[in-house]
Image (cartoon, rainbow, N blue to C red):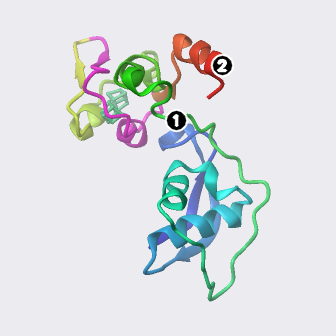
Amino acid sequence: MMDGILAMEGEGPGKSGKPRNIGIVLGSTDTMAIDFTVCSMLGIEPERLFTNQMAIEDGYEEDIKIEGDMPRITDFELPEIRTLVWGPEKFQGFVRRHIVQRPVCNDDMCRLCGECWRYCPAKAISHDKKRIHFDYDKCIRCYCCIEVCPHGALKAKETKAGMVMRRVLKV
Ligand code: SF4
Ligand code: SF4
């Protein structure tokens, strides 16, 4: 099932994105069919999503019959999609830990409410009396912290080194 009644566009999750009323619910016995259908609803090439790309490489063939109405949305604001790993395989551990985008905190907006460290599945967030701290070796980039932060203090940010390397490697 996919709930698209109130969707989010832009740089989500959490308060970094913008809620948008779409008013649909999708259901299928084939999870890939849902992902492919949402892509065509939004006018995105399915291969742009890594999971779809892997499914196609694994032999997934699109054979989707749609029952009900599917809106076509042409102005949906997409987040900038960054891959979590790239570059030569032997460097991917290093790239993932130090170079790909990561959650960062705007200390001026953080109220130390504790939601992020309570929900972080990797226990990668600690805090002192003034601010929170991330352990990027532990962080699995799930972005749950960004989603649960009630004050919009967190967002995903690419490191400067990552930006430079990605441009050089054209990924
Ligand atoms: S959830 Fe947001 S406001 Fe609360 S401690 Fe974490 S970053 Fe700060
Ligand atoms: S992205 Fe996920 S693993 Fe990383 S700090 Fe946030 S909640 Fe924890």
SS at mark 1? Answer: loop
Image location (x, y in percent) of residue 164: 61, 13
Q: Which of 1 and 17 is in front in this view?
A: 1
Indicate the secondary structure of the residue bearing disc 2.
Answer: helix
x 46%, y 34%: residue? 84
Based on the picture, tell me whether residue 138 belongs to the magenta stretch: yes
N-terminal label among 2 and 1:
1
As drawn, 27 above or below 169: below
Circle 2 residues within 10 Å: few <14, some 14–19, many ≥20: few
Residue type (three-letter) at the residue carrying disc 2: Arg
Residue 109 position, x and y percent, is 46, 22
- Ligand 2 shown in quarter: top left
Q: Residue 73, located in which quarter of the rendered image?
A: bottom right
Q: Is residue 74 magenta?
A: no
Q: Residue at x 43, y 25 (%)?
A: 102
Could you tell me residue 161's position as x and y percent?
A: 53, 11
Residue linked to disc 1: 83
Give the residue type that dot 1 points to: Thr
Q: Which mark is residue 158?
A: none
Q: Name the residue under label 2.
A: 167
Residue 17, placed above or below residue 26: above
Residue furthest to the right in view is 74
Q: Is the magenta stretch mostly helix, strand or loop?
A: loop
Decide: is 36 above or below 70: above
Q: What stretch is highlighted in magenta?
A: 130-153
